[in-house]
Amino acid sequence: MFSHVEYCDMHFVCGFCDGNARAAVQEYQRRFPDRRIPSRRVFTRIHQTLCDTGSLPRCIHWFVIWEEKLPRVFLYILYKFTAAVKESIKKYCNAKASGLMRR
């Protein structure tokens, strides 16, 4: 699976190559040397899926990509921060519901 951005780039490159999937693989590799290179079947599947459903194939979401690239410490900090925010919201709602907070 690829991200939405990668699928969009593949679709553009395939159109640039007049629908020739083999040429699209080579052009994609030339334009994006640091990315994983899809097979020609992926280029064909993108076009077929767009024709059949009107949308791109199933994608990897941005947070999965970030999670793979972020250091573990940063993810731990992010997790703790999110938990603290949830706890603060919960306390605020409980205080408001119990009538402790006034307008």
Image (cartoon, grey):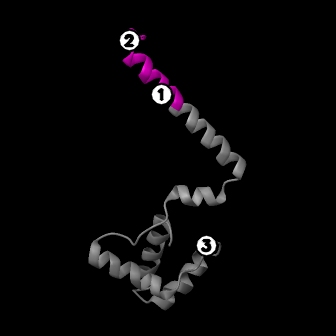
Between discs 2 and 1, the one toward the N terminus: 1
**Does the magenta-highlighted stretch encompass residue 12?**
no
The image's mark for residue 99 is: 2
Q: Is residue 16 left or right of residue 68?
A: left
Residue with the mark numbered 3: 35
In percent of width and height, residue 14 lies at 44, 81
- Picture quadrant of residue 67: bottom right
Residue with the mark numbered 1: 89
Q: Residue at x 50, y 69 (%)?
A: 6
Q: Residue at x 43, y 74 (%)?
A: 12
Residues at marks 3 and 1 touching, judged by CB atoms closer than 8 Å: no
Identify which amino acid the numbered label 2 is placed on.
Gly
Q: Nearer the viewer, mark 3 or mark 1?
A: 1
Residue situated in front as seen by the camera: 36 or 28: 36
The image's mark for residue 29 is: none
Identify the residue at the far front of this view: 98
Q: Nearer the viewer, mark 2 or mark 3?
A: 2
